[in-house]
Amino acid sequence: MGKIIPTASKSATRNLAEEIVKFSMELQYLEHDVEFVMDGGPSTIALLGMVISIRQRMGFKATKLLGKPHCKGRTAKVERFQTVRNQATALVCHIEDAINGALAGTHGLRAYALSHAVWLLNRFHCHRALQSTPSKTLTGREYTGSIVPFGEFVFGFRKPLKRKDGSSQWFGGIWIGKEESTDMNVILCKTD
């Protein structure tokens, strides 16, 4: 199971460490000692220290193991998720092909593409050895929700507001994925 947490910089922050701990809890890593493996960069070492500290303060076991330079043995599963970057690029290229042009100034859209790419891989990429998707392995069931192509123009219904300014309850935007915990559709739209 993979997760993307877009950040503004490579520096370790408490918010990022809390997101990693939260993800470990979502994966049910509660009772056993969890071994976190990261590369030896200064920012990842600092982040790893924060993650271990938070989990230990919560009463959950955690240890750290630094990857050896140029050795993929410990980080092979993480490195496999480099596929996410390629998947996100394919999603953005799909939109550019549809509009017959390049997207400019879309760093936010690219972050959504990364999040949606990992969401797709978690639910639809079948692991060869397990004969299961990561989502099915975790939840015990196949994902059966409906999705729309990334970047598709869709309409959303705004809940009735108690204002009478004549504005439409329907709004248009592009579909950029589903919310992880509630499976609600996420639409990127221009706000007034």
Image (tube, rainbow, N blue to C red):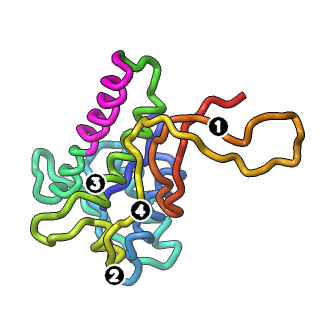
According to the image, label 3 marks what residue?
A: 121
Sequence-first disc among 2 and 1: 2
- Tell us which disc is closer to us: 4 or 3: 4
Residue 164 in the image: above or below residue 79: above
Q: In the image, what residue occupies the spot 34% across and 17% down?
A: 100
Q: Which residue is mark 4?
A: 145
Left-right relation of 100 to 73: right
Q: Residues within 10 Å of mark 4 (few under 14, many from 20)?
A: few
Q: Earlier in the sequence, mark 2 or mark 3?
A: 2
Which mark is first along the chain, 3 or 4?
Answer: 3
- The residue under the point 53% across, 63% down is 182
Q: Which residue is mark 1?
A: 171
| Closer to the camera in the image, 12 or 89 | 89
Looking at the image, residue 72 lies above or below residue 64: above
Q: CA distance from mark 2 to mark 1?
A: 47 Å
Q: Secondary structure at mark 1?
A: strand
In the picture of the structure, the residue carrying the numbered disc 2 is: 32
Q: Is residue 132 above or below residue 80?
A: below
Q: Residue at x 46, y 72 (%)?
A: 56
Circle 3: residue type: Leu
State which region is magenta.
84-100
**Distance between mark 2 and mark 3 Cα atoms:** 26 Å
* Disc 3 to disc 1: CB gap under 8 Å: no
Local secondary structure at mark 3: helix
